[in-house]
Amino acid sequence: MKTKVNHDLANITAARTTSGAADVKYSVIPNAMPASQEDAPYLGRTRVAGSCSQDELAEDMVKSGCLMNKEEIIRVWNGLGAYLLAKMPEAPRTFDLGFMRVWPVIGGTFPSPDAEFDPERNALYVAAAPSAAIRDALVGGTPTSANPATNLPSIGNVKQVGANEPNTIRSGAPFWILGRNLTIDNGDEHAELKLPGDGGTVEVTLEVQVDDDGNQRIVGTLAHAVDACEGAVLTLWTHGLSPESSLAPVTSNKLTVLAGEGPEPLAQTSDGKCKVMTFKDSEGGSSTDFTLGHQWELRGSGLFDPQHVPEGEWSGTDAFITVDGNEAGLTLEHSEDGTVATVIENGDIPPGTYQNVPFSYPVRRGGLSETLTLTIPTLVVN
């Protein structure tokens, strides 16, 4: 047994000596704590690409030479966790595991030396600390700055909303585009996903969410389903921090696309040839809050006007919204390929804020007519 322990420790020591602190990325962010902002206006923060799961860690240990297999490693971890869970409350003491210590800690302050424990201000919990060797594994190394040398935009990660796997998205599911100085405020920004080989490109619909620390988080969704693949690349055209600058392409790392269902149309004709996939206020950049007077944008397929409609396709000219029982006409402008219809003129509506406003888009084909109906969650009329 002693031989196994020494063998594992040798592997750990070797890993420590060959690991590169330069692989650790950091960014400099504004200090958000008012009390210390004057003395420390900026702080450093490490940037990690994701988390290592229990299974992944166990598999990597086996590959690195651990003499237990994956199942044995996980069984030991889970058994240790169950033991600490049972023993910590009944025998509160420090448990020294060699590579880590765990012990009970009291949080909060006491007003006097003889003050009693008060659950309103104090808490009893378990603390953990790694060994000195693990704690100091990166001491003396120099991490790599992830801050851009200029204000140029950059994409650091693209991942499925709510998931931890870096640079991995699922077809049909929304995903985050994470980076710095990414803006889509002008309305002409756009994105596409280039599939590997001769797979072509897929349009990506965008909606922005801005983080307070200067990073930019944009929500993207593929316009239609794609097959699972590896090596896809997302390109976002953005003005960066300067609205006056020209659009510039920003590319991601190579992405893994997992199989999934395509997004459901918001509305479509009975034969599915004319469909609306996204509907948003393109000036406000929102799919929930619309302002009358802004340009509104419908994206999908089969959205033709009568002048450019191919044979057998549907076409439309105008739309209308219904507010308090009254209809207001809307004038649309269509792209020649039938993928975009833009509201460019609006009818008169009394000022106010309206909820769940019906949006109707009539289309015709030969002697047939149908109406695609959408809902505007919030309509603001100034």
Image: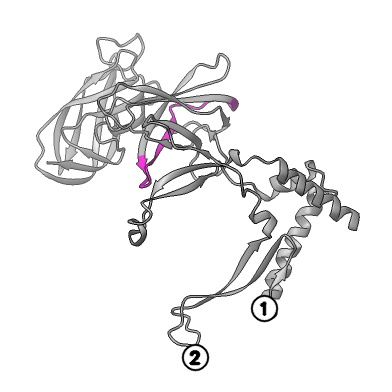
Asked if the magenta segment contains residue 57, the reply would be: no
User: How many C-alpha atoms fall within 10 Å of the one at disc 2: few (<14), some, or many (≥20)?
Assistant: few
The percent position of residue 227, horizontal first and vertical second, equals 57, 25
User: Is residue 337 or residue 327 the one in the foreground?
Assistant: 337
Asked if the magenta segment contains residue 219, the reply would be: yes
Query: Disc 2 residue type?
Result: Asp
Which residue in the protein does label 1 denote? 92
Residue at x 28%, y 10% (from the top left corner): 308
Query: Disc 1 residue type?
Result: Pro
68 over 155 or under it: above or below: below
Instruction: Residue 231: give its label.
Output: none
Residue at the limit of the structure toward the bottom, as seen here: 114
148 over 324 or under it: above or below: above
Regarding residue 225, the answer to whether it shows in the image is yes
User: Is residue 373 or residue 188 the one in the foreground?
Assistant: 188
Regarding residue 68, the answer to whether it shows in the image is no
To which quarter of the image does residue 333 belong?
A: top left
User: How many C-alpha atoms fall within 10 Å of the one at disc 1: few (<14), some, or many (≥20)?
Assistant: few
Identify the element where label 2 is drawn.
Answer: loop
Task: Give the extent of the magenta segment.
Answer: 209-230
Which residue in the protein does label 2 denote? 114
Residue at x 67%, y 54% (from the top left corner): 134
The percent position of residue 58, horizontal first and vertical second, equals 74, 48
User: Is residue 306 or residue 213 the one in the foreground?
Assistant: 213
